[in-house]
Image (cartoon, rainbow, N blue to C red):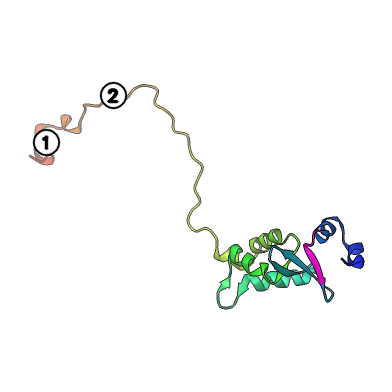
Amino acid sequence: MSPELESQLEEPWLRAYKDNKFFLVDGLLFHREKHTSALTVVDRDHISLILQDCHYCPYMGHRSEYRTRERISSPAWLPKWEQELSEYINTCERCQKENRNHGKKYGLLQHIEEPKHPWRPSTWTRSQDLSQEEKKTTMPS
């Protein structure tokens, strides 16, 4: 472990460094997780470039959050990168325009009043009001 690096790290990073989750090679800090390692990126400009490059592909267009996450995880490691990735994709203007929900929004459900008395069958029909001549002209035989 490098005492110079330990003096510069703050608590959550220092604990992870002591647990061998980070290592230093040629002045670059790498993050180790299981059997893979990735370059640690903390500069805001570099983070936005990595997010942009991994989210947009000229051949495939804008990738989903899942595919972007897979693409980012191999070359670089960013602190709180999953949260940053979600925010980046949720604010991507082109994704918001292309992936909007189609169709009308559903309205609020309305309460239907229950009848206050039981239903009674109606026996009245229009044919009872017709005269005999009207029945012959309007009613099929």
Residue 8, percent from left and from top: 90, 64
Give the quadrant of the C terminus.
top left
Closest to the observer, 47 or 16? 16
- Identify the residue shown where x is 87% and y is 61%: 9
- The Cα atoms of the two marked residues, 2 and 1, are separated by 27 Å
- Side (left or right) of 98 relative to 45: left
Closest to the observer, 41 or 17? 17
- Identify the residue shown where x is 34% and y is 22%: 118
Give the quadrant of the N terminus.
bottom right
Span shown in magenta: 19-24
Residue 83, percent from left and from top: 70, 58
- Side (left or right) of 69 relative to 17: left
Label 2: few (<14), some or many (≥20) within 10 Å? few
User: Relative to residue 84, is residue 27 depicted above or below?
Assistant: below
Q: Which mark is residue 135?
A: 1
Q: Which SS class for mark 1? A: helix
- Identify the residue shown where x is 26% and y is 26%: 121
Q: Earlier in the sequence, mark 2 or mark 1?
A: 2
Label 1: few (<14), some or many (≥20) within 10 Å? some
Q: Amino acid at mark 1?
A: Lys
Quarter location, residue 79: bottom right
- Side (left or right) of 20 relative to 120: right
Instruction: Give the labeled residue for mark 2.
Output: 120
Quarter location, residue 115: top left
Residue 111, percent from left and from top: 47, 34
Residue 47, percent from left and from top: 74, 69
Q: Amino acid at mark 2?
A: Arg
Q: Which SS class for mark 2? A: loop
Foreground label between 2 and 1: 2
Q: Is residue 47 magenta?
A: no
- Side (left or right) of 42 relative to 137: right
Closest to the observer, 110 or 128? 110
